[in-house]
Amino acid sequence: MSIDWDDLVLGPAMGLFGEKVIYTPRGGAPVTIPDAVFDEEAIELQLDQDGQTTTQRRPVLGIRASALPVEPKQGDRVQIVKTGKVYVVREPIPDGHGHVHLKLMATA
């Protein structure tokens, strides 16, 4: 039996915790997404070659793949409607269950 992750898990969770964003693919038209989960300062840990751990705080966005008109790519833009801030997608990371974790960069 296959689980419908989008309908049973992602949809309800994103509906509860999500906020409105405007997603604009490079060269495409903007799309309003009502339920993406944004974190201004998610912690990213990295292990350097010498065994040292570095910590960086970066903005991230969780989004349902079904809400996007195209596959997310580096260079796409996201506007957080509540704050008006615009970010560029640095790295999209799909999880294989219909959710995409977007690592973002702030724009100038």
Image (cartoon, rainbow, N blue to C red):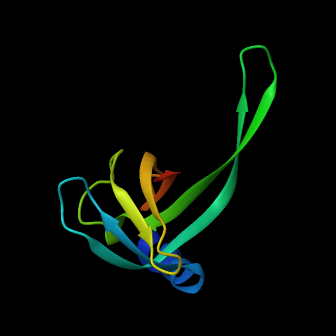
Q: Nearer the viewer, residue 6 or 68?
A: 68
Which image quarter holds the N terminus?
bottom left
Find residue 17 and report its image quarter. Answer: bottom right
Is residue 64 shown above or below 100?
A: below
Residue 6 % position (x, y) = 43, 72
Left or right, 53 with respect to 31, comes to right
Q: Is residue 86 left or right of residue 57?
A: left
Q: Can the viewer see residue 1?
A: no
User: In percent of the image, x 46 and y 53: which residue is there?
Assistant: 107
Q: Residue at x 47, y 53 (%)?
A: 108
Q: Horizontal and vertical percent for residue 28?
A: 18, 60
Q: Is residue 31 left or right of residue 65?
A: left
Determine the residue located farthest toward the right in the rendered image. Answer: 52
Report the residue that reaches farthest toward the front.
108
Looking at the picture, tell me which residue is in the foreground, 2 or 44. Answer: 44
Image check: 61 left or right of 75?
right
Task: Please say if 48 is above or below 76.
Answer: above
* Image location (x, y in percent) of residue 79: 42, 68
| Residue 96 appears in the rendering | yes
Asked if residue 45 is positioned above or below residue 1 in the image, the reply reads above
* Residue 101 picture location, percent across and down: 50, 55
Residue at the image point whose x is 68% and y is 55% from the top: 42
Give the mark count. Answer: 0
* Outermost residue toward the top in this view: 50
Q: Nearer the viewer, residue 8 or 24?
A: 24
